[in-house]
Image (cartoon, grey):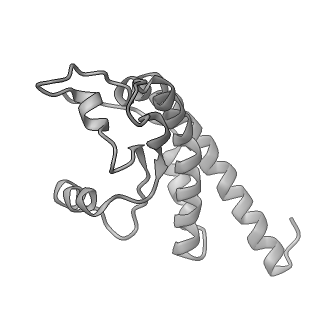
Amino acid sequence: MKITIRTKGFKEIEQALKGIEKKATAKVVMRRSLIKAAKPVADKAQAMAPKGPKPELSPSVGVSTKLSKRQKKLHRKAFRSDKASVEVFVGAGPLSSAHNQEFGNENHVAQPFLRPAWDAEGRATLDRLGDEMWRQIEAQARRTAKKNGWEV
């Protein structure tokens, strides 16, 4: 199934990011924005995660820039990302059985919680991301101006 999403304002954000002197600083701005925008998706997934007598799944759901070794290997195979890209992941920790809950297996019926969380928060997440990117870019501009002794 192919999904098409139309966004506005991200070309302008990209131009503003190019205006930041250091590439590493621009990546930090993007990473902070992505984490903040994705947090409500993780919160929704935590709330929707099935409850049970075994170790709870919901505490392992979160937002991170890190993957387990196995996840990194699979991610490298599936996606070619360049050094300029910034990625943030929303999901359950690597030691959880989240995939069995989300998709089910021969002994367990599916109890999706991540996909419904994205369905509920996806559009709002993209809107939050745009707003947060501008806030972070403006804050970085103020920090740079202050550091260089410019009038703000």
Where residue 25 appears, as percent x and y from the top left, is: 59, 71
Residue at screen point 49% across, 34% down? 41
Where residue 22 appears, as percent x and y from the top left, is: 57, 76
Relative to 131, residue 149 above or below: below
Q: Give the quadrant of residue 57.
A: top left
Instruction: Specify whether 32 is left or right of 119.
Output: right
Residue found farthest to the right = 151
Residue found farthest to the bottom = 148
Number of callouts: 0
Looking at the picture, tell me which residue is in the foreground, 3 or 6. Answer: 3
Q: In which quadrant of the rendered image does the N terminus lie?
A: top left
Q: In which quadrant of the rendered image does the C terminus lie?
A: bottom right
Relative to 116, residue 131 above or below: below
Looking at the picture, tell me which residue is in the foreground, 42 or 61. Answer: 61
Where residue 117 appears, as percent x and y from the top left, is: 43, 26
Residue at screen point 27% across, 64% down? 69
Residue found farthest to the front = 53
Residue at screen point 60% across, 69% down? 20
Looking at the picture, tell me which residue is in the foreground, 96 or 125. Answer: 96
Residue 3, visible in the rendered structure: no
Relative to 102, residue 11 above or below: below
Relative to 138, residue 20 above or below: below
Where residue 10 appears, as percent x and y from the top left, is: 50, 46
Residue 35, visible in the rendered structure: yes
